[in-house]
Image: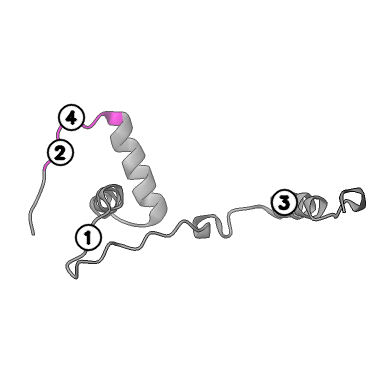
Amino acid sequence: MKQLTVRGIEDGLHKALKHEAKRKGVSINSYVLSLLKDTIGFINPNGQKKQVFSDLDHLAGTWSREEADEFDRALKEQRQIDGGLW
């Protein structure tokens, strides 16, 4: 494997990368590699493009009970059928 040195990383950018890597439970190196691969649409050694998901798994378990209840109330309001429109 090759190595790459990136120069000129500002303190704020380094801090943000370090924070996100810690939040995801990975090393800064692994996090930066994943960013690079995602950004350029990395093709794996089998010639297949890496599958990218756009789901909301990263949000699972992050809401408080109050936030979840508020969301459920908003959904319930949106799911009401307006009889005058039908």
Mark 4 sits on what residue? 8
Q: Please report the bounds of the magenta region as a residue range.
A: 5-11
The amino acid type of the residue labelled 2 equals: Val
In the image, taking residue 18 as reference, residue 58 lies left or right, namely right
Residue 59, located in which quarter of the rendered image?
bottom right
Please state which of residues 7 and 50 is positioned toward the viewer in this rendering: 50
Q: Earlier in the sequence, mark 4 or mark 1?
A: 4
Q: Earlier in the sequence, mark 3 or mark 2?
A: 2
Please state which of residues 29 and 2 is positioned toward the viewer in this rendering: 2
Do labels 4 and 3 touch, CB within 8 Å?
Answer: no
Q: Which mark is residue 58?
A: none
Q: Which one is in front in this view, the residue at disc 2 or the one at disc 1?
A: 1
Mark 2 sits on what residue? 6
Q: Which mark is residue 71?
A: 3
In the image, taking residue 74 as reference, residue 51 lies left or right, namely left
Name the outermost residue toward the front: 86
Q: CA distance from mark 4 to mark 3?
A: 43 Å
Do labels 2 and 1 touch, CB within 8 Å?
Answer: no
Mark 1 sits on what residue? 43
Do labels 2 and 4 touch, CB within 8 Å?
Answer: yes
The amino acid type of the residue labelled 3 equals: Phe
Dot 1 falls on a residue whose secondary structure is loop
Residue 24 in percent (x, y) is at: 39, 55
